Image (cartoon, rainbow, N blue to C red):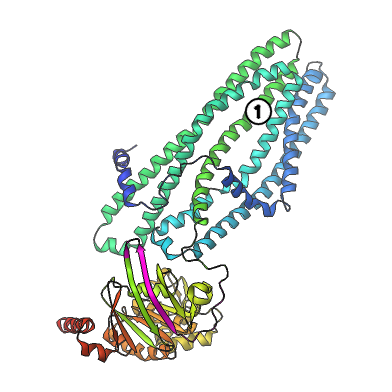
Amino acid sequence: MSTKSNQAEASAKIEDSQVGQRFVYQDDELIDKPFDWGQLKRLFSYMKPYKKQMLPIIIIMMLVGAITKLTVPLLIREAIDNAIIPKDKNLLIIIVGIMLGVYVVQWLANTFRIKFTNMIGQRVIFDLRHDLFSHIQKLSFRFFDTRPAGSVLVRVTNYVNSLQDLFTNGVVNLLIDVVQLVGIIVILLTFNFKLGAAIIVTVPIMFMISTKLRKRIRHAWQDVTMKQSRLNAHLNECIQGIRVTQAYSQEKENIQFFTKMNMINRLSWNRASMLNQSFGPLIEITGAIGYCILFWFGAYLIQTEEISVGLLVAFATYIGYFWEPITRLGQMYSQLLIAMASAERIFEFIDEKPSVAELEDAKDLPNIKGNVKFENLVFEYEPGRPALKGFNLDVRAGQSIALVGHTGSGKSTIMNLLCRFYDPTEGRIEIDGNNIRHVTIQSLRSQIGVVLQDTFIFSGTIRDNIRFGRLNATNEEIELAAKAVHAHDFIVSLPNGYDTEVQERGNVLSMGQRQLISFARALLANPRVLILDEATASIDTDTELKIQEALKTLLAGRTSFIVAHRLSTIRNADKIVVLDHGRMMEIGNHDELMQEQKIYYGLIQAQYKFLQDAV
């Protein structure tokens, strides 16, 4: 190992706890509880849908393979005792021919078994990953507030992938090994009970020793999964924040920190692998003891003419077969521990209940007019730190409401509660007299449109991104929406127009262009309630002038909530709500609030001064 690697390893050993402190999340603790057989049963329940389709074929092929394999030592004994020693060439040729046929049947059985087990295994992995992803889509914002994207990603990819061997090979191999072990034990004890019992007595000793390793191995693999989760979280953070990293010339420090995390991950894997590999030498030593007993005691039995030479050779072959499944069972147990460590993390997410959940008797929200009422809203992101304190507001259908205030005053929180991204700690929200907690989430959000400051553009074409607002929209409707928000001209100027492929997060587009696409998306959705959360913050002055007319089209006939700081965006609102530390301090239109000369007046004056200083 190089000096650089040695230094990184020593540093990683020292700073493991420090790295852990930087990336501590709810799922970053070892799950210290007994081996959960119920969870293992739950994992294998994913095979149930396929048991009638393919399991009978697999079991038949498995039994054929095991029986043919156990037949070979019997043919060897027959060849030695009745053909080789008596020098019967004709019988030897017949036995060799039968043995070749047995090997062909065994090869065909194993080939078909592997084919079908791989098919079932991949279907099980597909179902498990589908269930996990589908459940993650339903989880509330509060869940994602406490977990990095990398921690979620590693469960859907790495942890599910780690179960592939278990489902494609592990389960069937376990059955094969059990059948083979039982068959060998019965054969050995039947042919010569004393010799068979003398050899098999070593097995309980091996299992007594191996049980002491199980808990340590399980914790070691749990630690590996935790370190991998942290590594993925950091990697995702670095990729998302690469511009900030390069802007502040922090590449070297980032590489050093990643090297430490990478080394910690490697050391964790080494510890788990070392414990895992301890099964192999243990079985080899036990097997060597078994062979010593066989040849020592077997030689004595041959001398006393209690067994034949052919039977001794058959015993030796069976013992070779015997320790193969024992070795695989030890590896299977280690594989099972790895799988359980991953399954615990996967089911931890699947068992996570959304903090915003529908009532059992929730009904679809009928087509709304847009009357919205906030009644005594109190909300806390963290206990004891309220973001809203008794917020009340009655909005009539078609009104535009502007929310203003300093950062952290509660503007975006109100919008998050209206969309039911969170549920209020106290109070209620009604739309057309319907408590939004009593309606289905899909029917609520389908009638609310949201345009955010940080517009998310998906990989794909511009047409697909606009169509995301209404998936059944025609191409003509998409283009009409784009024209209404003045996005059509820049779109058609692109190489492939509306079919131009945009990269991840729309990096080929400017911030203003992304915002225009989000406006077209919202207009296409045609919601009755529209939320503009700092939606014009990233648009230059010239572009803003163009979309003011588009906003009139977008807001016409809709109840709208506008979170913004620019005077041009909010001065025409029907009501302006001034917030401060979660409380409503003022309400009125622009002229009324300017006449009062209180908080809103101060905000406007500060904005004018800033613009004058900038000029």
In this image, 186 relative to 380: left or right?
Answer: right
Query: Quarter holding the N terminus?
Result: top left
Residue 146 percent coordinates (x, y): 39, 58
Residue 142 percent coordinates (x, y): 41, 63
Residue found farthest to the left: 613
In this image, 174 relative to 509: left or right?
Answer: right
Res. 473 in view: yes
Residue 354 percent coordinates (x, y): 48, 62
Above or below 436: residue 174:
above
Picture residue at 39% right of the left edge, 82% below the top: 516
Picture residue at 81% right of the left edge, 24% below the top: 92
Residue found farthest to the top: 304
Res. 454 in view: no
Give the residue number, with chain letter if any, for mark 1. 322
Q: Nearer the viewer, residue 75 or 613?
A: 613
Q: Is residue 366 magenta?
A: yes
**Residue type (three-letter) at the residue carrying disc 1:** Phe
Picture residue at 54% right of the left edge, 68% below the top: 359
Q: Is residue 354 magenta?
A: no
The answer to which quarter of the image holds residue 236 is bottom left
Q: Nearer the viewer, residue 306 or 152?
A: 152
Badge 1 marks a residue whose secondary structure is helix
Query: Quarter holding the C terminus?
Result: bottom left
Above or below 88: residue 472:
below
Above or below 581: residue 606:
below
**Magenta span of residues:** 362-385
